[in-house]
Image: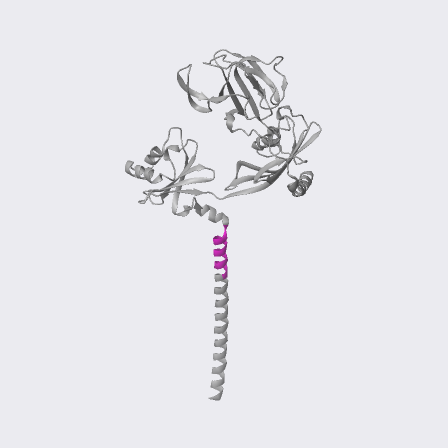
């Protein structure tokens, strides 16, 4: 009896040991499984890449089929939605609900859009999204609510820097340095009063520290120059941004504004008889057409001044238009034209250099005109702009109160530019 009990106890002990080891093994296995599952879950949940795939325009794309398209010339919202099965009543209701949020008549060809449909065999449209621009979009809810809302894509500004030399043009130099050539236009605006960008030479050097705006990893043509230098014709020009009196301007190393000065008007005594417009009734032609200038009514013989220093690039007579006219290039950004002159200033010719407020001609009524006046026009990068909106007064230099702070900013930025 005692012997049997001993064997029994041994057998029971071994069994319990095996069972205990099995329980531990199972627990470890389950723990590992949960750990791996938890790790998988964390990787999926925290993955930015997955989040970007799952959500677009704030809509969970994994629940819908998404079809992207481009608005074709002549296409309207009604045409696009009709092609996706929406009725005229539904389209009208969407248009009504869009009031105050988006004018559906302003849908432009070339813009992108997306249509979200159900994933079943019916493929019922649920959302229509129109990309107004790279940063904003309009969501049309195609379900019963027919709500219309505006959304914004997250943007970021990335700091960059570029250094290079001009071989043929600044535009090409930017491309050769894997930088958007649009930055060349930004620099021409900043340095336009100091450097003649039409006369750049080989080996002229530029250094720029700037920010560029990005949406969804794509660079937009929006730039903010943080500091720049340009070596041209054995001189180095700096552009240092600084906020003074609530306005950010670019200054040179001495603290003088890089922004040049224009006169408020090209003559002393005048009244404005016609303003800049895209639709003006022409008194001679008896029809409406664009008038991309400002007319100053003044007596014949009134002196006409150059609003800024520059070079005469055209002078002549246009019988069916401007009559006697003079065209002046002030820098690589701005040119001005003065038309209907009675006569030119003595000695004025193409190639002449003129100073600000130098007389270039006299008011008249030559060409297509009904009376003595000056038709004055301003062009920015070749495009007409409203002369009354051009910045006419020179900006103040850095004040004595701000000079110490500006000097510290200037020295720091010039050091960074030198280190590029």
Above-or-below relation of 243 to 262: below
Check if residue 37 falls in the magenta segment: yes
Above-or-below relation of 262 to 130: above
Above-or-below relation of 42 to 237: below
Residue 186 vs residue 23: left or right?
right
Residue 59 x/y as whole percent: 41, 46
Instruction: Write the residue at 39% across / 17% down.
Output: 287
Residue 180 vs residue 137: left or right?
right
Above-or-below relation of 234 to 296: below
Residue 309 x/y as whole percent: 62, 23
Question: In this orientation, does residue 74 appear?
Answer: yes
From the image, which quarter does the C terminus lie in?
A: top right
Residue toward you, 362 or 29: 362
Task: Tell me which segment is drawn in magenta.
Answer: 35-47
Residue 68 x/y as whole percent: 41, 38
Residue 340 vs residue 73: left or right?
right
Instruction: Write the residue at 44% across / 46% down.
Output: 55
Quarter of the image holding residue 316? top right
Residue 406 x/y as whole percent: 65, 41
| Colour mapping | one colour
Residue 66 vs residue 255: left or right?
left
Quarter of the image holding residue 69? top left
Quarter of the image holding residue 410? top right
Residue toward you, 201 or 361: 361
* Main SS of residues in magenta: helix
């Amino acid at each position: 009896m005692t012997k049997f009990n001993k064997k029994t106890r041994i057998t029971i002990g071994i069994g319990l040991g095996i069972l205990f080891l099995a329980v531990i093994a199972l627990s470890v296995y389950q723990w590992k499984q949960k750990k791996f599952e938890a790790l998988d879950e964390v990787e999926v949940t925290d993955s930015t890449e997955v989040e970007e795939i799952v959500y677009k325009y704030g809509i969970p794309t994994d629940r819908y089929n998404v079809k992207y398209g481009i608005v074709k010339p002549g296409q309207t919202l009604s045409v696009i939605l009709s092609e996706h099965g929406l009725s005229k009543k539904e389209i009208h209701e969407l248009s009504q609900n869009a009031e105050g949020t988006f004018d559906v008549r302003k849908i432009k060809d070339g813009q992108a859009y997306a249509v979200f449909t159900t994933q079943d065999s019916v493929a019922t449209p649920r959302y229509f999204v129109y990309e107004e621009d790279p940063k904003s979009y309009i969501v049309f809810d195609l379900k019963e609510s027919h709500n219309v809302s505006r959304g914004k894509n997250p943007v970021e500004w990335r700091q960059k820097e570029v250094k290079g030399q001009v071989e043929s043009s600044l535009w090409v130099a930017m491309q050769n340095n894997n930088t958007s050539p649009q930055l060349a236009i930004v620099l021409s605006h900043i340095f336009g009063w100091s450097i003649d960008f039409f006369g750049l030479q080989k080996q002229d050097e530029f250094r720029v520290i700037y920010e560029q705006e990005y949406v969804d990893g794509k660079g937009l043509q929006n730039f903010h120059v943080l500091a720049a230098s340009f070596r041209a014709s054995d001189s180095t020009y700096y552009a240092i941004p600084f906020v003074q009196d609530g306005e950010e301007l670019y200054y040179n190393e001495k603290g003088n504004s890089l922004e040049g000065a224009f006169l408020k008007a090209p003559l002393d005594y005048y009244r404005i008889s016609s303003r800049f417009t895209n639709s003006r009734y022409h008194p001679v032609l008896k029809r409406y057409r664009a008038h991309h200038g400002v007319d100053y009514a003044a007596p014949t013989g009134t002196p006409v001044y150059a609003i800024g220093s520059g070079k005469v690039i055209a002078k002549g007579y246009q019988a069916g238009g401007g009559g006697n006219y003079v065209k002046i290039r002030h820098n690589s950004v701005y040119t001005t034209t003065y038309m209907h002159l009675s006569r030119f200033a003595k000695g004025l010719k193409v190639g002449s250099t003129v100073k600000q407020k130098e007389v270039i001609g006299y008011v008249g009524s030559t060409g297509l005109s009904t009376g003595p006046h000056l038709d004055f026009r301003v062009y920015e990068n070749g495009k007409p702009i409203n002369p009354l909106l051009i910045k006419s007064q020179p900006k103040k230099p850095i004040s004595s109160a701000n000079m110490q702070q500006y000097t510290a900013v200037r020295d720091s930025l010039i050091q960074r530019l030198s280190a590029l």
